[in-house]
Image (cartoon, helix red, strand yellow):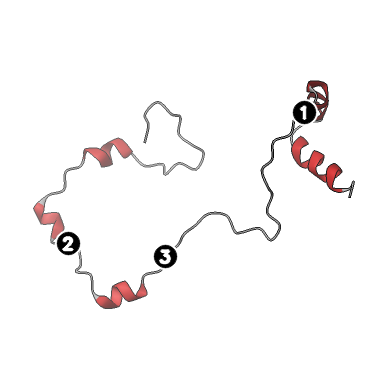
Amino acid sequence: MNANKPASRRSLKSDLARVDAHKVKASEYEELPELTEEMLGRAKINKGGRPFSKNPRKLISLRLPADVIERWKASGPGWQTRMADRLSKLR
């Protein structure tokens, strides 16, 4: 974790400096259970991330006049989605 970056809203709320400073002692290893084949068999892989879209968007590069972009931006947040909706109606 970078100390210069501000914490995100979804922070762990942990004292990471204290966790990083902790040195594991030999006696702490005795507390850990042995991994068995049954434990490994129950393990699940969670790839996480967003679900795949049935209609994914494609990245393109499009040059537009500056005044057109400024007018769309002035319409407020979500201007790119509104622009895409307007363009899709031209079909």
Which numbered mark, 1 or 2, is in the foreground of this view?
Answer: 1
Residue pictured at 49% horizontal, 43% vertical: 10
Q: Is residue 1 left or right of residue 64?
A: left
Q: Say what amino acid the circle numbered 1 marks.
A: Lys
Q: Nearer the viewer, residue 46 or 21?
A: 46
Query: Residue 57 appears at what percent x and percent y?
Result: 69, 49
The residue carrying pointer 3 sits among few (fewer than 14), some (14 to 19) or many (20 or more) residues within 10 Å by Cα, namely: few
C-alpha gap between disc 1 and disc 3:
41 Å
Q: Secondary structure at mark 3?
A: loop
Residue at position x 43%, y 29% in the image: 5
Occupied quadrant, residue 22:
top left
Q: Identify which residue is drawn at 9% across, 53% down.
A: 26
Calculate the distance from the C-alpha at mark 2 to the C-alpha at mark 3: 25 Å
Identify which amino acid the numbered label 2 is placed on. Glu
Kindly indicate whether the residue at mark 2 contacts the one at mark 1 (C-beta within 8 angstroms). no
Tell me the SS state at disc 2.
loop
Which residue is under mark 3? 45
Q: Earlier in the sequence, mark 1 or mark 2?
A: 2
* Secondary structure category for the residue under label 1: helix
Residue 66 horizontal/vertical position (percent): 78, 22
User: Residue 53: which quarter of the image?
Assistant: bottom right
Query: Mark 2 — residue?
Result: 31
Residue 4 on image: x %, y %: 40, 26
